[in-house]
Image (cartoon, helix red, strand yellow):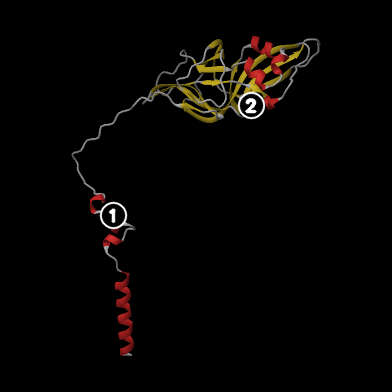
């Protein structure tokens, strides 16, 4: 039995020392790193850290479905504004669209589906200005936040989010004169290329008249422009019929052309 105990003891000692490594070998690759490259830690209570903000000249904008719109008075960053430039296109890329021989417009509107994110006070009513663009926006071109397009103001409204189709939406006026021209001009409804060449797009911004004081008033809201509810709706009827029902057509902000 004493011989067995001796063998066990020697085996234990052999295993113990064969597993022991130098401290410098406990980290992979540390043994090949020069000593002057090792990181050191110094503790001090007399150092000062000075921080500042730096203005960024511009930020790249992207042709994705989520866009932000509105104005807010933040307690830290002050006033912040977000606006939208967008063109619009024939839904489903239809071709040779026609609204009859005598379509008569009843009304038109812009609908933006609220996407459940916001900064500020969601209940704040803001004043929105709607413009028509006088020059084209090209899909796929890299635009930055300093980019400005020639535009003409066509509407202004103070409003809150409203319920459409069971969800919250922002509903703004469109230009009825342009809407009437769109539905009665089939030459520009041949395809989306002809349509976008004729109708440059829109610009939506929150007006300087919006009440965003005191702190935390106003709101910047996120909208889903690809949502089926988002688009420009035009309500019209057949002018050749005294009993014609009101129809609606929607031009969208989604798709590769918009």
Residue wearing tag 2: 229
Q: Nearer the viewer, residue 97 or 214?
A: 97
Q: Is residue 35 left or right of residue 11?
A: left
Mark in the foreground, 2 or 1: 1
At x 30%, y 68%, the residue is 20
At x 46%, y 22%, the residue is 145
Q: Residues within 10 Å of mark 1 (few under 14, many from 20)?
A: few
Quarter of the image that includes the N terminus: bottom left
Q: Is residue 46 left or right of residue 95?
A: left
Residue wearing tag 1: 33
Q: Is residue 107 left or right of residue 26?
A: right
At x 45%, y 20%, the residue is 146
At x 30%, y 28%, the residue is 52
Residue 96 location, quadrant: top right
Outermost residue to the left: 46
Q: Would you place residue 210 above or below residue 112 in this image?
A: above
- Where residue 253 appears, as percent x and y from the top left, is 61, 24
- Where residue 130 appears, as percent x and y from the top left, is 55, 14
**Could you tell which of marks 2 and 1 lies nearer the N-terminus?**
1
Element under label 1? loop
Element under label 2? loop
- Where residue 28 appears, as percent x and y from the top left, is 34, 58
- Where residue 21 appears, as percent x and y from the top left, is 29, 66
């Amino acid at each position: 039995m004493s011989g067995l105990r001796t063998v066990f003891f020697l085996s234990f000692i052999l295993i113990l020392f064969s597993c022991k490594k130098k401290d410098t070998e406990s980290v992979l690759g540390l043994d090949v790193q020069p000593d002057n490259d090792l990181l050191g830690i110094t503790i001090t209570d007399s150092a000062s850290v000075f921080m500042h903000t730096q203005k960024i000249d511009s930020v790249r904008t992207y042709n994705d479905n989520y866009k932000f719109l509105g104005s807010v008075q933040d307690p830290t960053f002050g006033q912040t504004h977000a606006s939208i430039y967008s063109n619009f296109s024939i839904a489903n890329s239809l071709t040779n669209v026609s609204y009859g021989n005598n379509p008569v417009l009843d009304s038109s509107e812009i609908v933006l589906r609220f996407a459940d994110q916001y900064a500020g006070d969601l209940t704040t009513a803001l004043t929105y200005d709607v413009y028509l663009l006088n020059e084209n926006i090209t899909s796929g071109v890299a635009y930055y936040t300093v980019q400005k397009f020639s535009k003409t103001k066509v509407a202004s409204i103070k409003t809150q989010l409203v319920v459409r189709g069971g969800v919250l939406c922002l509903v703004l006026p469109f230009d009825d004169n342009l809407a009437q021209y769109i539905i009665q001009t089939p030459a520009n409804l041949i395809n989306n290329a002809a349509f976008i060449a004729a109708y440059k797009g829109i610009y939506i911004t929150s007006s300087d008249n919006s009440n965003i004081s005191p702190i935390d008033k106003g709101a910047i809201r996120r909208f889903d422009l690809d949502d089926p509810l988002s688009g420009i709706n035009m309500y019209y009827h057949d002018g050749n019929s005294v009993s014609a029902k009101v129809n609606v057509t929607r031009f969208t902000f989604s798709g590769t052309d918009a």
